[in-house]
Image: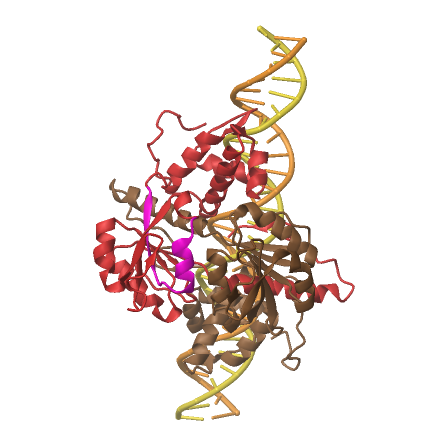
Chain colours: A red, B brown, C yellow, D orange
Amino acid sequence: MSQQRTDSSASPAFPDLPEATVARLPEYLRALHSLAEQGHDTVSSEGLAAAAGVNSAKLRKDLSHLGSYGTRGVGYDVALLITQIEAVLGLSKHRTVALVGIGNLGHALAGYGGFASRGFSIAALFDAERAQVGERIGGLVVRHIDELAEVVAAEGISIGVIATPAQAAQQVADQLVAAGVTSILNFAPCVLAVPPGVDVRKVDLAVEMQILSFHEHRKALTALPGQRPVSNGRSGEAIGT
Amino acid sequence: MSQQRTDSSASPAFPDLPEATVARLPEYLRALHSLAEQGHDTVSSEGLAAAAGVNSAKLRKDLSHLGSYGTRGVGYDVALLITQIEAVLGLSKHRTVALVGIGNLGHALAGYGGFASRGFSIAALFDAERAQVGERIGGLVVRHIDELAEVVAAEGISIGVIATPAQAAQQVADQLVAAGVTSILNFAPCVLAVPPGVDVRKVDLAVEMQILSFHEHRKALTALPGQRPVSNGRSGEAIGT
DNA sequence: CGCGATTTGTGCGTGCGTTCACAAACGCAT
DNA sequence: ATGCGTTTGTGAACGCACGCACAAATCGCG
């Protein structure tokens, strides 16, 4: 309501978008793409919320933060909302990624089709071991980590993915930062120290498993003595990252 | 302080441990193992907090929730704290996992050493495609999804990992639940519907990338007009899941 | 043209999580 | 035994996020 629809590519910066909202926007985007494929032109907040697995009030508040484009009594224009969210997330500019560490996980990430279809393309692969260098994976050749700075500059890479062992991760992070990368997705199970202005997100598969293990453990314990029947509060619903 | 040290394997259930705390315990555990390897017998909250990438006050409060085992003026006994956290997370019991979907990502997960070393072992691999069935990966043979229920019961599997395409994920989830699995880690980019009492955690690699993309986009925008110099509030620090 | 049905956008109360700051507890040296 | 420096555990304040509930807005129909 507070924003005109005329400027489609103005990108109003959104400096104070709540972090929790930002984390949900990709989920909304995925749900919207799914709805678009099913032929929906418009969708209500209730419908979209269900598809994204969140509360409808939360969804509406999230969308209102970005000046939102809904019509009362009707709902949201699916195509328009997709465009809007992609603009806010900066996906209009197709971003290129450097993947470092071509082990088990690195191979999988390099071959994972989910990136390209969602606005990213892996532009270069790196490894420190000579054994890996030169290997072809999905149209790309694995290069040695020493070429990182050069390739990052040439390809305009702004995001780095670390899929190395924990022991090597900090050094790789330093090299990425030195090469000009300002966002890092870290799969190594360790804490990275980076200078201000660089964003790091961490994905640790073992951590996710251990959280599940806790709930599993708790369910087993509360089931035995005649306690309340497990009311987890979150069970039965998929939860976000 | 509120708890005796005598009962080491009593496992006091912790029904009301804050979810945010649970999510950080695995990170503390990893940091503790790292410290133990470096020969530390005790560690201060400040030291452990630094190793885990969190605030020290938050760490102390988290540990106090589980009856904590620190000594004022000294710090925490590393070995004892490891035992405690593992007990709370239910890692004393070595948990077995079923992995469904042996594509790109499934291969990587099956071969990923980080699971076994942190209290989990993949007990069975499944796929729906005949082409994959029979393949050997790291000592395990890929079985057809129809054998799921039988194997889950035989191996006592309580956790399922879904690494299939989104389109197949819901059906796999249904089969896992029907087989008795009560915790699911979902890598497919979709929302899963499961009955109450079943926990689902989702990991979506594209979502992580898109969140990074947003910050990247914002940094680029705020850098141009003479605005405040990027004060992200989180930059320079690795953040949790 | 007006009315009812529908759906968005949001003000407000509530609960959770984080952080500060400090008293209590501990070890060690004297 | 006493005092001092260190570190834990926690009370209290703060801020964010969530969800309810409702007013405002829009559409369609009579």
Quarter occupied by residue B40 = bottom left
Q: Nearer the viewer, residue A200 or B159?
A: B159
Above or below: residue B122 compared with residue B224? below
Q: Residue at x 48, y 51 (%)?
A: B204
Q: Could you say where residue B27 lies in the image, as x and y percent from the top left?
A: 48, 66
- Drawn side of residue A206 relative to residue A9, left or right: right
Q: Could you say where residue A34 lies in the image, as x and y percent from the top left?
A: 51, 38
Q: Could you say where residue A13 lies in the image, as x and y percent from the top left?
A: 35, 39
B233 is within the stretch colored magenta: no
- Drawn side of residue A153 relative to residue A43, left or right: left
- Drawn side of residue B98 relative to residue A63, left or right: right
Quarter occupied by residue A79 = top left
Quarter occupied by residue B130 = bottom right
Q: Which residue is drawn at 39% across and 46% down?
A: A116
Residue pushed farthest right? A226
- Which stretch did the figure color magenta? A94-113
Count the marks: 0
Q: Can residue A223 be seen in this view?
A: yes
Q: Can residue B45 be seen in this view?
A: no
Q: Which residue is drawn at 35% across and 51% down?
A: B232
Q: In which quarter of the image is the N terminus of chain A?
A: top left
Q: Could you say where residue B45 lies in the image, as x and y percent from the top left?
A: 46, 72
